[in-house]
Each structure stands twice: as structure tokens, then as C-alpha cells.
Image (spheres, rainbow, N blue to C red):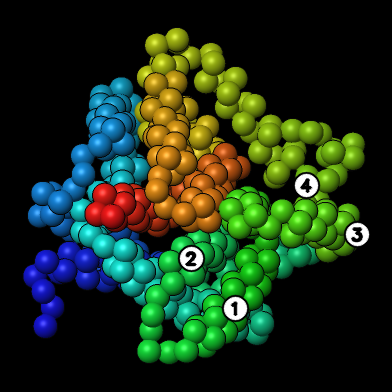
Amino acid sequence: MIEKSTIPFYIICLFAVIRTAITLSFFSTHGMFGYKFLELFGLLSSYGLIILFLICLSSFKFDKLFILISFFCIYTLLSLSWGSNLQETIRFLLPFVIFFAVRSALTSKDQVKLLAFLIILSFIIPIIGSSLLILMKKSLYLTVYQTGIDRYSGMYLKIHTLAHCMLIFFFIAAIYQRLGFRLPIKEKYINILFFFLSILALFNLYKSVTRTVWIGLIVFSSFYLIGKRKYLILLLCGSGLFFIVLLSSQLQSMLFDIIQPLQGQGQISNIGSGRLGGWTGMVMSFLNEPLEMQFLGLGIGSEVKSFFGGSHNDLMSLLISLGYLGLSMYLLIYVFVVFDIIKSKIDRVMKFIFLGIVFSVITMNFGSNSYLSRFELGQYFYLIIALFYILDNQCRKKQLAD
């Protein structure tokens, strides 16, 4: 019999499991009422989570971060009056809802453990299925014209979705393994499952050739090893990675649009599929706007074709869309989260896991359209940040009780 007080927790679990499944290719290409299932789930689940948050409002801790996020959301809504696209603004803000809903619905460390475990289980089919499709060469997304390298999307519609979901798996797996969870299964079998899934997830990530996510994984792994004081392993891995890139013609081909411009074969502006040149042009165009519009921004959806994220740099998209004020408020949210993690009562390794996640996401947001412009990634990220605050709150309660 499920207790009434735990119903919100199980709703969050259901959301998290469906979130993983609904991201797969089938749900991104099929739907009803003129919407894809992926879009319907994102919209309906967000409004459902708003209702859940309001129901659990009494258990929510109102703090400085809540105030800052609220101000940022209000400012973003006000931008509708000077140019923001309504649909893009809603899509941009709704991922914040999961942060409030999870913080209000989960009340114990054991609930965090169980939620993390269920998310990992929900990744089993996508990870194994994607690996099988790639091995059978049945999920080819594109072949890079300049190098002939194949990029695969696995069970997902796009290569970027595959890569980011694999990284999300690593984030959640690290949190779960640090927390531990007693199951009626021998621990060695769980570890074997984790190892098997991790190898396949790495394979999928590699075959997607999504370099932004490679960098995100490197940043996260570095923080994780520092947290565990594995400095020698970090040094050896870093040195090994450097020499592999230096000696591997395959990896050099994958990084051709970075290596060639640096070697003088082409313009520097062409680095990263032309990102550097594109960013330069966008900044110059933005600086030509009136000063008041630079502070306020041109509106969400203003930088490219009326959608947010067209600049392949989420932070630049934010600057152009919401100006100096909006970008400053958003970065301040990250500053608050980082300081809260540093000052938290969770153990050292867990601190560095969450710091690694935050800095990994910041890095990817700067290098491409990632956790701000991709709705599902935003939901995953704010769910993870909410888990940190729940764990920290439980540690503080335990200290007071002791």
C-alpha cells in the first residue's frame, strides 16, 4: 500500500523514467493532434509538475536561489514585451519547473537513491539498443563529407541527443554509485551491469562523434577524479589522451576543422565548423544595437529563425536574447549553485560529482546549443541540481539531530 505522502515521489519517478523513453527516435517522429509525442510529453509533464509543486508547496524550502530563479523567469517573461517569441519563451522556462517539483516532492536520501536507480534502469534499453544499431550500421545519421567519418544516432533521432543522453547516464550513475543502495541482488552483479552499460555508453558517445559532449565528459571525469584524490590517474589519463589524439589519424580526422585551421590550413574563423567566425559576426551585430537593447536583449528567438539556440553557443544566445541583464542573472544562478555545493555538508566526492556536472554543463553550453536550448536536457539538468539540494538538506538535518 502506497502512503499518501509518498505519491509525489512516485510521480517524479514515473516522470523520470518516461522522460528517458520518450526521448527515443520513435516518439520524436510520431505523435497526435499535430504534435510529436516528445513535444506533448514535455508540455503536459511540465504543467503537471507545476500542479505537483503547488500541492507540495508546504514542504518546499524558499531560499535565495528560488528568489533568483523567480526574478530571472519574471524578467524573461517581461521580454515578451520587447521581442521574445512566446512559444520559445515557454520552452525556455519550463525546464525550471522540474527543479521546484523535485525539491518539494522528495524528502529523503533513500528516495534520491531509488530515483537515481530507476533512471539508470530506464537507460538499459536505449544504451544496449543504440549499440546494437550502431554495430549493425542501421542508425547512420550522416557521413562527414570532408573525412568520410560516419556519425550514428543509435535509437535516437539525432546524434546530439544520443551523445547527451549517454552523458546524463554517467552523471546519474556517478551519483547513484556514491550513494549506494541495498538491493536483494549481490553488489558485484550491480557493478558488472554498471561496467557493461558504461562501456556501451562510451562506445555510443564515441560513434556519435559529438565533440562538445566529449569535452563535457572530460570535464566531469576530471572533477570526479579530483574528488577521489586520484591525481596520478588524472595525470596519466590526461597525458594518454593527449598522445592518443597526437598519434591517432582517426581522431585527428574527427577534429579536422579544429586542427587544420590551427596548422594554418584555412582561416581561424572556420574552427569548430565555423563557430568562431559565426560567433564573431553575431557579437559584432549585437554591439551595433542601441545600448538599451544590449542591456535588455533582442528577445528570445531573435538570433536565428525565431528559435533559441541558433548560434551554437547557448550563452551567446542568452546574451543576444536577454542582454547583459539576462545573462548576468543566469550566470549568477550558477554562481549560487557552485557556492552552495562548496559550502554543503555532503561528502567531498559527492561535492566534486555535482561540481563536475555544473562545470561540464557550463562548458557545453558555451561550446554548442546544449542545456539551455534543448528542452529535455534542461529538465535532466535541473532535476540533478534539485537532487543536490535534497541531499544537502538531509545531511544538515542529520547533523542537527546528532
Q: Residues within 10 Å of mark 4 (few under 14, many from 20)?
A: some
Q: Earlier in the sequence, mark 1 or mark 4?
A: 1
Q: Which mark is residue 178?
A: 2
Q: Distance between the residues labelled 2 and 4?
A: 38 Å
Q: Residues within 10 Å of mark 1 (few under 14, many from 20)?
A: few
Q: Name the residue under label 1.
A: 195
Question: Between tags 2 and 3, which lies in front?
Answer: 2
Q: Earlier in the sequence, mark 1 or mark 3?
A: 1
Question: Between tags 3 and 4, which lies in front?
Answer: 3
In front of the other: 172 or 76: 172
Q: Which three-letter amino acid code belongs to the residue tagged 3?
A: Leu
Residue 60 shows in this picture: yes
Which residue does the image show at 23% across and 60% down from the upper left? 107
Question: Between tags 1 and 3, which lies in front?
Answer: 1
Q: Where is residue 231 in the image (x, y as percent from the top left)?
A: 72, 53
Q: Mark 4 points at which residue?
A: 257
Q: Position of residue 323 (x, y in %)?
A: 43, 23
Question: Between tags 2 and 4, which lies in front?
Answer: 2
Please, what secondary structure does the residue beneath circle 2 have?
helix
Q: Earlier in the sequence, mark 3 or mark 4?
A: 3
Q: Earlier in the sequence, mark 2 or mark 3?
A: 2
